[in-house]
């Protein structure tokens, strides 16, 4: 039987249906053939992946072309200069000007709005420096140590050791805070917290007084020396060793005064430490005042005794004397101290000058320091006590104003 396949079929002829069926029957597919086909397919696919290197696994992809542009040309400098400047923020009030410049603007009391009467206070660029102490021209050796003396040409410690007055207009106030040199905390607080123009009085009993007073003077404070004097209830109230007594003879009191003056250097004058009885006894007080004046010093009455005769004896003994008009902490309460400070300021505005004293109580130092910062902004000018002592020569005296 002739084989019916493509080799025996006439050229150009199409197989019949029966021929196609018989061809399919003759083609048998075995399992090894199927496995071989699958394996070949895997090999071919892996080869294509390796050669083509397509990490996307045949996923569709696109190529974007990035064009490089030239950088934009900046605007000409002329155009930038012609552009209007934005308004800058600046001080918009007097307080802003004060904070930015350090200049204090003071207006008349009671004016709420700016007026033509304005005082501008410019703080000094450098702190005031006091003369070095001791000055060899003003020192002599005494029985207890170095003490002040009147120099050649009547050169006085009152003038050399005084804090310079910067001058200016407006009401002036001098304040003396005494009782320092004993308590370290109070002394340090007074030196650092109080304005330098406030004078400080030192008791003669502290340790290392020379260094303490030098530190106060370096800070700009004028120094005074307290001399212990007999009170009315002595010895129940005892100022301390070397107290000047009404029962002592003048040479003995002067020797005690010499001991007091040898405790430190650089002071402009003597302040009574207690002493209500001695300052009311002219026979005991007069020799003491003469000695103080002869050594180029002044005497300051702290105003605690209404019976003191120091101011009335000033002209007779030719010694500069100043008496405090107000004792700020006679009643040691915050509200009372504030009230006396307000009275002091009112008196200075009325008379042009006022002088007050206070003790070194922590409360007093705190209230005076707070008031001083505000008073200076209101046009009050703080001055040292030597301004009162040197005001018009040896005959100068300030009498007290009773509350």
Image (spheres, rainbow, N blue to C red):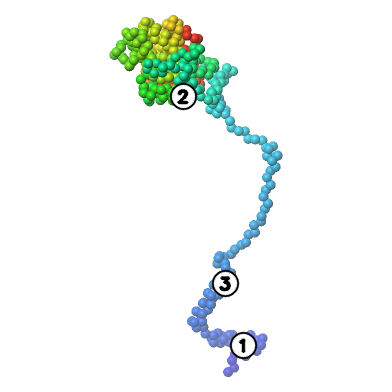
- Is 325 above or below relative to 104? above
Q: Determine whether the residue tagged by mark 2 lies in a helix, strand or loop.
A: helix
Task: Between label 1 and label 3, give the one nearer the viewer.
Answer: 3
Residue under pointer 3: 48
> Which residue does the image show at 54% across and 87% down from the upper left?
26
Horizontally, residue 34 falls left or right of residue 70, namely: left
**What crowding class fits label 3: few (fewer than 14 Cα within 10 Å), some (14-19), or many (20 or more)?**
few
Counting the numbered discs, the total is 3
**What crowding class fits label 2: few (fewer than 14 Cα within 10 Å), some (14-19), or many (20 or more)?**
some
Residue under pointer 1: 6
Q: Are marks 2 and 1 in contact (CB under 8 Å)?
A: no
In three-dimensional space, the C-alpha distance between marks 1 and 3, rounded to whole angstroms, equals 35 Å
In three-dimensional space, the C-alpha distance between marks 2 and 1, rounded to whole angstroms, equals 130 Å
**What crowding class fits label 1: few (fewer than 14 Cα within 10 Å), some (14-19), or many (20 or more)?**
few
Closest to the observer: 30 or 338? 338
Which disc number belongs to residue 213?
Answer: none
Quadrant in which the N terminus is drawn? bottom right
Q: Earlier in the sequence, mark 3 or mark 2?
A: 3
Q: Most extreme residue toward the left, as rendered?
A: 236
Residue 360 drawn at (x, y percent): 39, 20
Residue 372 in view here: no
Q: Determine whether the residue tagged by mark 3 lies in a helix, strand or loop.
A: helix
Residue 133 drawn at (x, y percent): 46, 21
Horizontally, residue 328 falls left or right of residue 15, namely: left
Residue under pointer 2: 218
Closest to the observer: 357 or 297? 297
Q: Earlier in the sequence, mark 1 or mark 3?
A: 1
Residue 75 drawn at (x, y percent): 69, 43
């Amino acid at each position: 039987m002739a084989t019916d396949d493509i080799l025996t079929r006439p050229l150009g002829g199409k197989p019949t249906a029966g021929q196609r069926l018989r061809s399919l029957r003759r083609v048998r597919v075995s399992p090894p053939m199927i496995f071989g086909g699958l394996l070949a397919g895997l090999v071919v696919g892996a080869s294509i992946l390796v050669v083509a290197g397509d990490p996307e696994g045949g996923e569709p992809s696109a190529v974007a072309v990035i064009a490089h542009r030239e950088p934009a040309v900046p605007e000409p400098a002329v155009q930038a200069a012609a552009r209007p400047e934005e308004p800058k923020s600046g001080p918009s009030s007097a307080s802003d000007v004060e904070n930015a410049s350090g200049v204090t603007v003071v207006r008349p009391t009671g004016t709420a709005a700016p007026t033509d009467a304005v005082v501008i206070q410019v703080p000094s660029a450098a702190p005031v420096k006091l003369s070095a102490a001791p000055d060899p021209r003003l020192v002599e050796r005494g029985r207890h140590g170095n003490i002040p003396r009147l120099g050649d040409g009547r050169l006085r410690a009152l003038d050399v050791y005084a804090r310079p007055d910067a001058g200016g207009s407006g009401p002036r106030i001098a304040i003396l805070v005494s009782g320092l040199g004993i308590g370290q905390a109070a002394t340090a607080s007074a030196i650092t917290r109080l304005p330098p123009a406030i004078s400080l009085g030192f008791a003669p009993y502290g340790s290392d007084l020379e260094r303490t007073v030098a530190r106060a003077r370096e800070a700009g404070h004028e120094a005074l020396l307290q001399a212990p004097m007999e009170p009315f209830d002595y010895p129940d109230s005892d100022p301390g060793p070397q107290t000047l007594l009404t029962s002592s003879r003048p040479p003995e009191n002067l020797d005690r005064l010499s001991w007091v003056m040898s405790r430190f250097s650089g002071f402009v004058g003597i302040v009574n430490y207690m002493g209500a009885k001695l300052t009311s006894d002219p026979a005991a007080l007069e020799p003491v005042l003469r000695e103080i004046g002869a050594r180029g010093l002044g005497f300051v009455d702290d105003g605690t005794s209404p019976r003191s005769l120091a101011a009335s004896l000033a002209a007779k003994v030719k010694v500069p004397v100043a008496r405090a008009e107000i004792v700020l902490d006679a009643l040691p309460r915050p509200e009372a101290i504030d009230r006396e400070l307000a009275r002091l300021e009112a008196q200075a505005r009325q008379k042009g000058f006022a002088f007050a004293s206070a003790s070194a109580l922590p409360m007093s130092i705190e209230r005076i320091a707070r008031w001083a910062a505000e008073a200076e902004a209101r046009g009050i000018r703080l001055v040292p006590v030597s301004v009162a002592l040197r005001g018009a020569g040896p005959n100068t005296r300030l009498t007290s104003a009773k509350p």
